[in-house]
Image (cartoon, grey):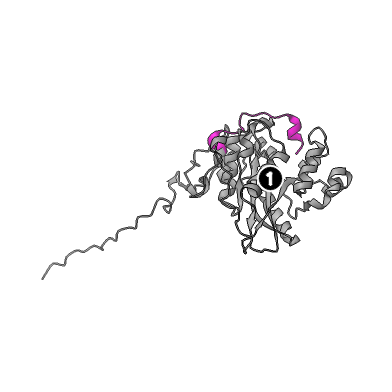
């Protein structure tokens, strides 16, 4: 009688996953997600069960894309998503520019561009070749304004991973003095049409790019205040460039256009965008929620939430009651 050897199954080596493919660690019986962040725990910190993890796809600008400069000496106008050739030579090339505080940038700021491009496509006159955010400088002196370097970075985080045509231009934010919107639009015209010569058609012809200011209904209504907007600037913005106006809840942009002499004069250069799905997110509300230790999840991109938390933005700020009551 021979002894039967005791055998054990051969253990197969386990595949080694790259770091980005490995599952997140488990802590306290709960698997943590790289995007599982929360701002509802004052003073502005993550909970014990929600330790944030690095996530390159959320936190970093894609490879090959330069971040905006922090000083004018090294500034370069961003063109990495500016189309070089028109797809349809019968169309007029168009660039959409949004000027504002973006403190912080929200999903409504992103949606405004998408609503704009939908409206523009219906006209069959323009082909959008690029879109830009232009955050104001610190010299704007507005309550609730985070430092310009942070606002520019948050705009980059918001659009570089979520859009294929939006860019951030830091020129306005780097200026030593406050720049009027008319001057900012002149800057875009110089960079795109003067320095670059516009956009090529498929047969090699150079065509100038039309530049439109993208704004919310509240900004347009402020154009009726002569202490905020000079008449010559309004003629320059609306006459030379033009405006895309997104209606906000409770605003009647068309009635305002009818009642304002300068805007009525240039009404053919103003495109009103009707919100089919109303979105009433505002940066003012977001800042208030953060100060109160409330969640801002789904009001702005996770990458922006993470950035705000890491830099402690808006926590110790105070704003006039009138600002908060307006929403």
Magenta highlight range: 308-327
Extreme residue toward the bottom, this view: 1
Q: Is residue 27 left or right of residue 75?
A: left
Hey, which quadrant is residue 321 in on the image? top right
In-front residue for pair 232/261? 232
Residue 314 lies in the magenta-colored region: yes
At x 76%, y 47%, the residue is: 240
In-front residue for pair 177/207? 207
Residue 72 lies in the magenta-colored region: no
What residue sits right under mark 1 in the picture? 98
In-front residue for pair 284/253? 253
Within 10 Å of the Cα at label 1, are there few (<14), some (14-19), or many (20+) other Cα atoms?
A: many
**Residue 279, image x, y percentages:** 72, 49
User: Could you tell me which quadrant the C terminus lies in?
Assistant: top right
Q: Is residue 15 left or right of residue 300?
A: left
In-front residue for pair 263/283? 263
**Residue 217, image x, y percentages:** 77, 45
**Residue 234, image x, y percentages:** 79, 41
Q: Helix, strand, or loop for circle 1?
A: strand
């Amino acid at each position: 009688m021979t002894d039967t050897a005791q055998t054990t199954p051969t253990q197969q080596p386990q595949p080694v996953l790259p770091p980005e493919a490995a599952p997140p660690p488990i802590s306290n019986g709960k698997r943590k997600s790289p995007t599982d962040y929360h701002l509802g725990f004052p003073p502005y910190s993550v909970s014990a069960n929600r330790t944030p993890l690095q996530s390159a796809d959320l936190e970093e600008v894609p490879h090959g894309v330069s971040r905006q400069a922090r000083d004018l000496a090294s500034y370069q106008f961003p063109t990495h998503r500016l189309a070089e050739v028109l797809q349809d030579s019968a169309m007029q090339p168009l660039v959409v520019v949004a000027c504002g505080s973006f403190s912080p940038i929200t999903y409504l700021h992103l949606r405004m561009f998408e609503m704009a491009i939908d409206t523009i496509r219906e006209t069959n006159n323009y082909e959008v070749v690029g879109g830009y955010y232009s955050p104001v400088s610190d010299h704007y002196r507005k309550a609730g304004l985070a430092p310009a370097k942070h606002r520019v970075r948050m705009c980059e985080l918001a659009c570089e991973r979520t859009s294929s045509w939006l860019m951030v231009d830091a020129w306005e934010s780097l200026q030593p003095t406050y720049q009027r919107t008319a001057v900012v639009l002149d800057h875009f015209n110089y960079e795109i049409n003067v320095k670059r010569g516009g956009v090529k058609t498929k047969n090699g012809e150079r065509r100038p790019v039309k530049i439109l200011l993208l704004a919310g209904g509240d900004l347009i209504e402020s154009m009726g205040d002569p202490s905020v907007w000079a008449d010559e600037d309004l003629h320059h913005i609306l006459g030379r460039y033009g405006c895309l106006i997104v209606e906000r809840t409770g605003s009647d942009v068309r009635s305002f256009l009818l009642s304002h002499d300068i805007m009525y004069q240039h009404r053919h250069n103003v495109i009103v965008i009707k919100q089919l799905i109303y979105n009433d997110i505002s940066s003012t509300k977001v800042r208030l929620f953060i100060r109160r230790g409330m969640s801002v999840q789904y009001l702005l991109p996770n990458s922006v939430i993470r950035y705000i938390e890491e830099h402690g933005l808006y926590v110790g700020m105070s704003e006039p009651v009138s600002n908060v009551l307006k929403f």
